[in-house]
Amino acid sequence: MAADGMNYAPQGKPAPVCQPGDFVFAAVALDHGHIYGQCNGLIEAGGLLARVYDPDPKKVAAFVEKYPQAKPASSLEEILDDPAIRLVAAAAVPCDRGPLGVRVMEAGKDYFSDKTPFTSLDQLETARAAAVRTGRKYMVNYSERLHVECAVYAGELIAGGAIGRVVQVLGLGPHRLNAPSRPGWFFEHKKYGGILCDIGSHQIEQFLFYSGAKDATVTESAVGNFANPKYPELEDYGHANLVADNGATNHFRVDWLTPDGLRTWGDGRTFILGTKGYIELRKYIEVGSDAGGEQLFLVDGEGEKHLSLAGKVGFPFFGQLILDCLNRTEKAMTQAHAFKAAELCLRAQAQARRLAVKP
C-alpha cells in the first residue's frame, strides 16, 4: 500500500455505465496525487480520459505514462474550449481549487475537485453562486468514504435500517506526514487551509452522509502542532465536535502523526452508533493481522458479524457521477451536500482554538 495518503489511488473493477466515448473528461492541475484516484474511478465507470493539462511538463509526462490515452493540452483554455469535454477533474493546490472550479463551470463544464474543495468561505459562496448561475456541477472527491468499499457498504447497511437511527459518528483520520515527499505548499497555511479544513473535510462529509443530516453546528474544535516545529504553519493535530440538525452528534480526530512502523499511511477508522446496533470500519489496515483493510464489523439484535469487503463492493459513486452529468440528476451526491460538508469544515477550522504545546 502507499506509504503516504498523497499517493493513495485505489483501483477497482471496470463497471461502465455508458458506451465508450459517451462521457469524455479531462484532468488538470496535477498538484496532488489524488488526481490518479479520481481518474481511475471515472475510467472504471466508462469515462474516456481524453486530455490533460498542467504547467509542469514533468507532471504531465508522468501522468501520460500512466494514462497514454490522455493528449496533453498547451493551456487550460484549450481544454475549457473543447466542446467534447463534459467534465474537468482537478487536484489543484487547495487554495486554487475554488477559483478553478468557477472557471470550469463558467466554461459550461462540470467540475470534479479533490477535497478539500475550498480554503475560505468567500470561495465557497462564489462557487455556490456560479453553480446556480451556470447549472453546472461542483463535485468533490471525499475519497475516505467514496473510494473505500467498507465505507460504501456501511452506507447501504444504514439505508437498509441495519442499525436503526444513527445517533453518533466517531471518525479517526490519522495520516503519515512523510514530510520530505511533500510539496512546499503543503506547509503554507493559506494554501492548504488548515488540518480541519483539509483532511477534516472527509470526516464531516461522512458524518452528514451516515446520519442523514442536512446541516450541523460545530460546537468545539481545536488544532495544534505537537511534533513538527520545523514547519510552524503546519497543524499536525486537530479535532472537532458537531451536532446535526436531526440530533446526531459527531466527534472526529485527524492528525499527521502516523508512525513509520505502520504498514500503510493511516489507520483510518469510523464508528457509527445507531439505536439498534453499531458499525465499525477499519478502512486501510487491520493492525496486527494479515487481513488488510476494508474490514466492517456489525453488531445488531441478531449477533456479531465481520465482513472483509475488498473487491466485493466496488465504487459506485463514479458511475453515478457520470450518469448525473449526462442526465442532470443528483444520485451520486447532491450539490447541497457537497457544499455543506465544505462549509462545516471551513467553520470548524475558523473557530478552532490553538492548543498550547509545551515541551
Image (cartoon, rainbow, N blue to C red):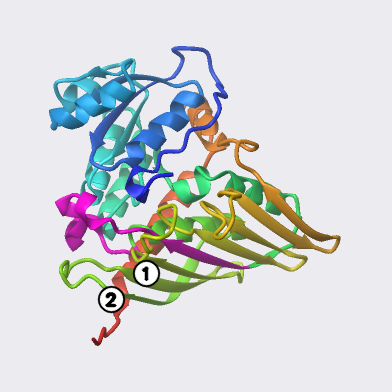
Q: Which mark is residue 233?
A: none
**Amino acid found under the numbered disc labelled 2:** Phe
| Quarter of the figure with residue 40 | top left
In this rendered view, identify the residue nearer to me: 22 or 285.
285
- Is residue 126 within the magenta segment? no
Coordinates of residue 197 in the picture (x, y in percent): 33, 61
From the viewer's perspective, is 94 left or right of 335? left
In this rendered view, identify the residue nearer to me: 274 or 150.
150
The residue where tag 2 is placed is 226
Exactly how many numbered labels are in the figure?
2
Quadrant of the snapshot with the C terminus? bottom left
Q: Residue at horizontal 59%, vertical 48%?
A: 294
- Label 2 and label 1: CA atoms lie apart by 19 Å
- Residue at far top of view: 20
From the viewer's perspective, is 297 left or right of 142? right
Residue 214 shows in the view: no
**In front of the other: label 2 or label 1?**
2
Q: Mark 2 falls on what kind of element? A: loop
- Is residue 187 within the magenta segment? yes
Q: Residue at horizontal 43%, vertical 57%?
A: 266
**Amino acid found under the numbered disc labelled 1:** Ala
* Residues packed near mark 1 inside 10 Å, few (<14), some (14 to 19) or many (20 plus): many
Coordinates of residue 292 in the picture (x, y in percent): 56, 49
The residue where tag 1 is placed is 348
Per the rendered image, the range of residues in magenta is 168-196
Residue 72 drawn above or below residue 352: above
Among the two numbered marks 2 and 1 on one chain, the one whose residue lies closer to the N terminus: 2
In this rendered view, identify the residue nearer to me: 288 or 324.
288
